[in-house]
């Protein structure tokens, strides 16, 4: 009986260590989130510029064909 209790306590302690390690990983990842979001905003802005340029190219190509 005492051995089972000791084994269970050891398992609980090991699980608690895993939980703490995972919480540390979460905190680290949350620290990186603002950088990721900022990069995604830049990507979206660049994609909008690309679409605008593609529209201009398409318009100029269409005009050139009409002549």
Image (cartoon, helix red, strand yellow):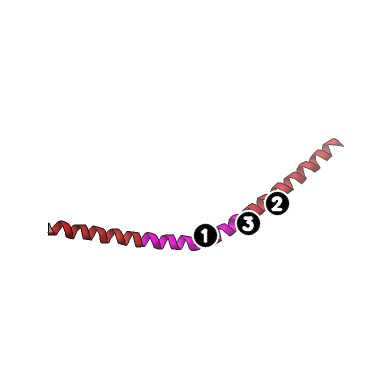
- Give whichever of 41, 64 is nearer the camera: 41
Decide whether residue 32 is among the magenta residues.
Answer: yes
Mark before the other along the chain sequence, 2 or 1: 1
| Mark nearer the viewer, 2 or 1 | 1
Q: Which residue is tagged 3?
A: 42
Span of residues in magenta: 21-43
Decide whether residue 46 is among the magenta residues.
Answer: no
Q: Which residue is tagged 2?
A: 49
Rounded to the nearest whole Å, what is the CA distance between mark 2 and mark 1? 24 Å
- Give whichever of 63, 35 is nearer the camera: 35
How crowded pointer 2 is (Cα within 10 Å; few <14, some 14-19, many 20+) is rated as few
Q: Are marks 3 and 2 in contact (CB under 8 Å)?
A: no
Q: Is residue 16 above or below residue 57?
A: below
Q: Which residue appears farthest toward the left when viewing the image?
A: 1
- Quadrant in the rendering for residue 20: bottom left
Write the residue at 62% across / 56% down: 41
- Quadrant in the rendering for residue 36: bottom right
Residue 8 numbered mark, or none: none
Mark before the other along the chain sequence, 3 or 2: 3
Mark before the other along the chain sequence, 1 or 3: 1
- Give whichever of 57, 52 is nearer the camera: 52
């Amino acid at each position: 009986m005492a051995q089972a209790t000791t084994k269970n306590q050891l398992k609980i302690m090991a699980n608690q260590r895993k939980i703490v390690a995972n919480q540390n990983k979460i905190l680290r990842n949350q620290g990186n989130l603002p950088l990721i979001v900022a990069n995604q905003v830049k990507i979206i802005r660049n994609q909008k510029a690309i679409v605008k340029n593609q529209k201009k190219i398409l318009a100029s190509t269409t005009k050139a064909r009409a002549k």
